[in-house]
Each structure stands twice: as C-alpha cells, then as structure tokens.
Image (tube, rainbow, N blue to C red):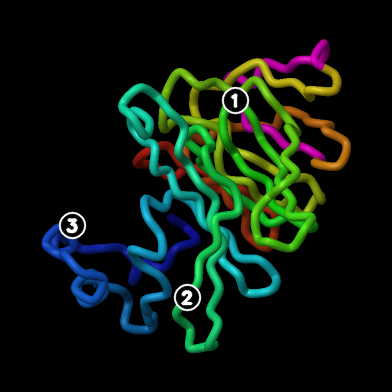
Amino acid sequence: HELVPPAFLASARVNSLQRATTPEEALAALQVDPTLDVKLAAAEPLVVDPVAIDFGTDGRVWVVEMRDYPQGMDGKWKPGGRIKVLRDTDHDGVYDQGTVFMDDIPFPTGVMPWKKGALVCAAPDILYGEDTNGDGRADVIKKILTGFATDNYQARVNSLSLGLDNWIHVANGLRGGMVSNPNRPEQKLDIRGHDIRFQPDTGEFELVAGRTQHGLMRDDWDNWFGCTATNLV
C-alpha cells in the first residue's frame, strides 16, 4: 500500500468483464489509470486456460495452459496441461503463432525460460524441458526438484522468479511438501510455512522466509511480494 499510488486503487468493484464474450469486448470493458494503455496481445483460440506467463529475452511468450483443471481431461485426473510458446511473426504487437512445447503435464502452474528451454512447475515436480532437435517441442525433460504437495489441484508450487541473489525463487503454493533433489532423494526439506529458492544446474535448494500461495515477484531492490488468494503479503 505504501508503494502503489492511490490513483491505482479502484473506487468500486467493476463487473463489466463478466458480460464480455469476445476479446474486443473484454478489452473495451477494462478500466485503468488514464496514464496506462492496454492492448490485446493474445486470445483464444491461440491460448486456452492460461494461468501463468513469462517473457523470453527473444520476445516470445511462454504460457502455462491448465486445460486439465479441475478433474483432468477425462474427469478422472488424466493430465492435459501444456506449455505453449507464442510468437509475433509480423511484429505488429499481437501474437499470431503458437507451438506446444510440453504437453500432458499434470495441472501446471508456472513457467520460466531457462537456458535452451524452460523450467516448469508441475507438482509434485519442478521440471526442465529442452528442445534439442529444433522442432519447437521439448524432447528432453528432467526433474529438478520433487515432493511438492498435490492434494489441492490449484494451490500448488508456482511463480518461478530469478532473484538478485542469482537463485530461482518459487512460491510454496500453500500446501508445502517434503522436497528433494531426485539425484539425492535422501536429502529432504519440509517446506511447510516457507517458500524456497533453488539452483537449477545443481539441484541445490533452501528454505526462505514467508509462504506465498499464488504469485511471487520482486522489485529492483530485491523486495519480494507474494499473496494469498485475495491478499498481498
């Protein structure tokens, strides 16, 4: 509340988005501070059921599609989440091409481009996927960490974010878990009540203060902001 200018606080809850049936109607219904400008970058059918995005240094957008929520693709928990990469091929500011990078992931909740691929939150795991043959799809998938709780189909590990400490920080997701590196399964940490940070190349990980349910991000001074389902913490 100290950091956000009062001009950005909404005076009343606006429900006009509930009546929007097209991307254009949704865009027209948005009410923002007059110093801001909102433009449509992507919409269905190019993306479906997006729950998280991240931008690569090349301008591509990595999207998490949780298509399998809440009961799987078949109503019996069959995984169907996807990671899709969007491109703006004609450079007009609107993404017009999408490639499925990974699919059949159980209820994915986070993505971050990393080296030649991407890190993905898909409890009980954090995965690394890489395309080694140039077809746009991950043909190498590795488990970096495992053991995150899966007893809730939305409150799961999420929000991969690189800190100024050069570690990747990640939100607990609320339910915790007994987390380990698959290469060293005997070393486990109970992350109940904490978020964590880790090194993808070594699998090293540590507890950090605080517990974030959804959404973990830092500012340029390394102040970290997380939230519960409704509150900034």
Element at label 3: loop
Q: Which residues are magenta?
A: 185-199
Q: CA distance from mark 3 to mark 2?
A: 30 Å
Q: Which mark is residue 13?
A: 3
Is there a contact, CB below 8 Å, between mark 3 and mark 1? no
96 in relation to 226, above or below? below
Between disc 3 and disc 2, whose residue precedes?
Answer: 3
Q: Please indicate, yes or no, whether residue 138 appears anywhere in the rendered image.
A: yes
The spot of residue 152 in percent (x, y) is 42, 23
What number of labels is visible? 3
193 is within the stretch colored magenta: yes
Magenta segment, prevailing SS (helix, strand or loop): strand
The residue pinned by badge 2 equals 95
Residue 12 visible in the picture: no
Which residue does the numbered mark 1 point to in the structure image? 124
Residue type, numbered disc 3: Arg
Q: Amino acid at mark 1?
A: Pro
The answer for how far apart the CA atoms under marks 2 and 1 are is 31 Å
Q: Nearer the viewer, residue 42 or 3?
A: 42
The x, y position of residue 87, in whole percent, is 55, 73
Q: Nearer the viewer, mark 3 or mark 2?
A: 2
* Image vertical order of residue 67 relative to residue 59, above or below: above
* Residues at marks 3 and 2 touching, judged by CB atoms closer than 8 Å: no
- The front one of 134 and 191 is 134
State the residue at coordinates (82%, 11%). 186
Residue at point 56%, 66% (across, down): 61
Q: Look at the picture and state if 194 lies above or below 233.
A: above
Residue at figure coordinates x 57%, y 62% from the top left: 85
Q: Residues within 10 Å of mark 3 (few under 14, many from 20)?
A: few
Tell me if residue 45 comes above or below residue 126 in the rendering.
Answer: below
Q: Is residue 231 left or right of residue 221?
A: left
